[in-house]
Image: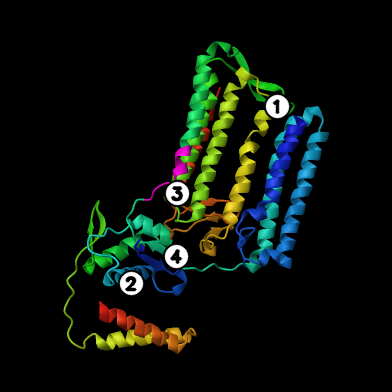
Amino acid sequence: MRLVLCTVYVFMGALLFALPNMTRREILFAVPVPPDFREGREGRRAIRMFRLVMVAVVVAAAGALLLSPDGLLNTTAAAMPIAILLAGGIAFRWQNRTLAAAAVQFTRPRDAEMTAEPENLPWFAWLGAGPFVILAAAATWLYLHWDRIPARFPVHVDARGQANRWAERTTKGVYGPLFFGAEICAWFLAMALAGWFGSRRSRSRSVMLGGMIAVEYLVGLLNALISVQSLFGIPVWAIALSPMVILVPLIIVMTNKMGEPWEPMDPTPNECWKGDIFYYNPNDAALFVEKRDGLGYTLNFANHGSWMLLLALALVIASAPFAIA
Amino acid sequence: MAQIPRIRFDPASGIPAVRQIVDNLRVLLVEGQLVPGTTLPSVRRVAIELGVHFNTVAGAYRQLAAEGWLDLKHGRGAVVVPRIVPAVANGAWNADFRNRLRGVVAQLRAEGVPTASIADELRAMAKVVTRS
């Protein structure tokens, strides 16, 4: 189990390591810069410093986990991902401040087509229904094989891979993870559709929609695996590492697609980026805009719709204790 | 396939957004790129595309409706309507037009646009106006 957790930490570290390459060429550590800036001395130095910090922190986290005594393993396992994310955030912010003086303001006119034709979703939007089918199929399977489900089965393991929480063969115990998975999938689907209809027309918008649907599949598959685990005896390590099967190709595809020079960067005003991460522009009707600190899109927090989406997420999270045994 | 008419908003121009939208739409209406019966896109969609507030686009639509170009009926959106061109007293427009044109030409020259290019553009525009 220690090796599985180490793999997860290394994966997290690799994602953060690759973060400078996950933005458009005109953005580096959330700072808008000239396209060739990252090849210059200052740009290369900032990337190198950020990556050095990430490598050091991930090596330290993996070492701490491998050398941790059994009694402290659970605490170490919980603390290390937080340490990696915190270090990543601090290193990112450090480089962001260092490059602030090099920031430029994108200025580009925007066009609007004067047509009232309805906006059609791309064909692959229908795939958003897939995760619900997967969850329903898992529920049907469990229903049909109800007698084979153990009267008490593990639903949570500690850092050593030993079960530390169990559920009973009740409606809530068996179908709970599926119901909760459906809630999260519905939220992701709502985000995907809100992102499509609430952002400016661009090819990046299709990439964002596809990415959200892929994440929906990840949630659906993970919850389906967890729910049928008691029947098939799926190893914990397989469940823990399964998200990577979708995440790795998704990140590679999205990085390549978003990096293609289809169209210039959306010229959102610099002063509307709070901490260069949160977009707050009451004069922009868009609900979603292109991110500056990584792949994809982010919310315009001045739009009331963004708070509705966050409220919906809070309700989904708050429902977890009621949905899951 | 006919090209879809477009309007443009340049946040760096210093010209208020409402005016830019009204001016752009008026060009499309006068040139016949938007003909009577055409339904304009929703205020929401145009505002998102141009990165401006909903009220800015709504204000532009209202101004054009006041000028007689659009009919704004609730639930139907903004529809282009036939407009009767008002009669203008001879020569009354001339001084104002010349003044505005001189202002635009002066601005372009100050920005470094070659005078020959400006003259070519004005000639081309004169041909379009004469044809319509």
- Residue under numbered circle 4: A110
Q: Earlier in the sequence, mark 3 or mark 4?
A: 4
**A126 horizontally vs A64: left or right:** left
Closer to us: B88 or A92: B88
**A21 horizontally vs B41: left or right:** right
**A63 horizontally vs A101: left or right:** right
Q: Secondary structure at mark 3?
A: helix
Q: Picture coordinates of residue B67 (x, y %)?
A: 23, 69
Q: Secondary structure at mark 4?
A: strand
Mark 3 burial class by Cα count in 10 Å: few <14, some 14-19, many 20+: many
Residue sitting at x 50%, y 16%: A143
- Residue under numbered circle 3: A196
Type of residue at label 4? Arg
Type of residue at label 2? Asp
Mark 2 burial class by Cα count in 10 Å: few <14, some 14-19, many 20+: some
Q: Is residue A291 above or below residue A40?
A: above
Q: Chain of mark 2?
A: B
- Residue under numbered circle 1: A158
Real-space CA distance between mark 1 and mark 3, rounded to the nearest whole angstrom: 40 Å
Q: Picture coordinates of residue B76 (x, y %)?
A: 24, 53
Residue sitting at x 65%, y 23%: A234
- Residue under numbered circle 2: B23
Q: Picture coordinates of residue A152 (x, y %)?
A: 61, 14
Q: Is residue B10 above or below residue A302?
A: below
- Residue A249 - label: none
Q: Is residue A166 visible?
A: no
Q: Earlier in the sequence, mark 1 or mark 3?
A: 1
